[in-house]
Amino acid sequence: MTQYDSTTARVPATARTWEVVTTYRECSVVTGHSTSIVSLTRTPFGLLAQIDGEDVELRRAVNLLEGATSTRVIHEIIPTPDGIKAHTQAVWG
């Protein structure tokens, strides 16, 4: 991902999307993995959340992010003094 200077880093993103990997365990044995795409978008009315393109309650998306084995930002939109800056990273590469 792009390294932002201290000025840009303090500006909250308008939108951010993560690739989220969750590992499921039973009695310390890995029983499965799942990969999801989680998006949070800031609006004048609050945050909107999506999981795999489906609108969900914010709490559900946050729980998935917090419980993930790993997360990777794959897209973000950050307002800058010059306008909006979008950065996308390929999901599978």
Image (tube, grey):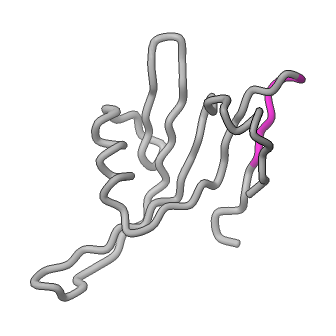
Q: How many marks?
A: 0
| Left or right, 64 with reference to 36 | left
Query: Looking at the picture, how far across and down is residue 16, in whole percent?
Result: 59, 41
Q: What secondary structure characterizes most of the magenta part? A: strand
Residue range of the region highlighted in magenta in the rendering: 82-87
Locate the C terminus by quadrant.
Answer: bottom right
Query: Looking at the picture, how far across and down is residue 65, in whole percent?
Result: 39, 52
Locate the N terminus by quadrant.
Answer: bottom right
| Left or right, 54 with reference to 93 | left
| Left or right, 64 with reference to 87 | left
In the displayed orientation, state which residue is furthest to the front: 6
70 is within the stretch colored magenta = no
Seen in the picture, residue 45 relative to 34 is either above or below; the reply is above
Query: Looking at the picture, how far across and down is residue 5, in whole percent?
Result: 80, 43
What residue lies at 67% left-to-right and 42% top-to-bottom? 76
Query: Looking at the picture, how far across and down is residue 92, in whole percent?
Result: 65, 70
What residue lies at 64% left-to-right and 55% top-to-bottom? 74
